[in-house]
Amino acid sequence: MKKAIGIDIGGAHVKIGIVDEGGNLEGKTWIACNGKTREEIRKESVHRIETYQQKDKDILGIGRGCPGSIDSQHGIVLYSNNLKRKNIPRKAFLEKTTGLKTRITNDANAAVLCEWRFGKARGRKNVVLLTLGTGLGSGIIVNGKLREGKDGTGAEIGHRVLYKNGRLCTCGRRGCNERYVSATGLILNAKEAITKYDSPLLSSYDSITIKDIFLSKDKDRACLEAVDSFVSDLKEVLINVNVVFRPEAILLGGGLSDFASYFLPELNQRILEDNSGFEENHHARILIAENKNDAGIIGAASLWL
């Protein structure tokens, strides 16, 4: 059976795994990035890949998903706002260090390819997937084809402005969607709310996690407000996506999708109450990606399968 290695580069973790031609993830490794130098992360990543190579000799190649502008033909990360890198020849590096042929794409493109081939978007011709992680990524399938744009970023919904003169974004603009509809945005919501309410989270201000916020939202007013604002902003993003692309489904993936039970019911209710763009018979289904936080790995590997 054909197999490939998939790599998903995120702001907090590097995820690596082996995927077979049926889209099954046979093994997965998470490498935490916090507190490590780039050289340490690279060395650990190569070591994990070499371990997979020793266990399985039939690997076709490596697929790598990375946030930002990607020259997929030459395997170069042109620029990544969240990773603060530019003009990085990742294809050449991986091929030299591992001996495996490598293909590179935008991370959200990898995720939507995964769901389109192996997940909840199977059989659909028009789909949008939003990756709710450190930032907000987006992958789009239009009439059965991946919409990439000239540099792999033809679907940067995360950098559409939601609030004029809002929070400063990593791209240099203000008020971008991803500064509100992402894990980073949710944590910023909580930090802003903490200044208004007496919150138990105040003592852990510098180490608040999205898990803390969701688990505390029913008993902590600051957390409730943080989630409420997140849901309200996500609703606006989804309505705009639906109006512009008219997809059959909008999928939510990334790390925040693991907490969908805490916000999806309220999100769906608000969308029903606000008919703008989601009129009867014209609305997309809002679905949680079947492969959730593994979609990036599987989709990257699928570049070879």
Image (spheres, helix red, strand yellow):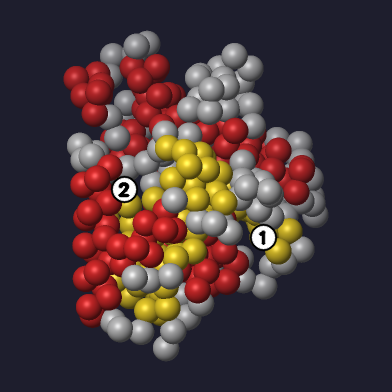
- x then y, percent, for residue 47: 21, 62
Q: How many marks?
A: 2
Question: Dot 2: what SS?
Answer: strand
13, 234: nearer the viewer: 13
Which one is in front, 248 or 38? Answer: 38
Q: Residue at x 28, y 14 (%)?
A: 198
Q: Quadrant of residue 205?
A: top left
Q: Amino acid at mark 1?
A: Leu
Judge whether residue 279 can be spotted in this image: yes
- Residue 32 shows which numbered tag? none
Q: Amino acid at mark 2?
A: His
The secondary structure type at the circle numbered 1 is strand
Rendered residue at 34%/11% (across/down): 195
Image quadrant containing the N terminus: bottom left
Q: CA distance from mark 2 to mark 1?
A: 25 Å
Where 101 sits versus 74, above or below? below
Q: Is residue 145 left or right of residue 87?
A: right
Q: Position of residue 54 (x, y in %)?
A: 22, 78
Residue 284: give x, y in percent of width and height. Answer: 70, 53
What residue is shown with label 1? 146
- The label number, if any, that marks residue 13 in the structure image: 2
Q: Earlier in the sequence, mark 2 or mark 1?
A: 2
Against 276, residue 109 (above or below) is below
Q: Residue at x 47, y 38 (%)?
A: 86
Residue at left offset 61%, top offset 21%: 163
Crowdedness near tag 2: few (<14), some (14–19) or many (≥20) residues, C-alpha within 10 Å: some
Residue 96 shown left or right of residue 254 in the figure = left
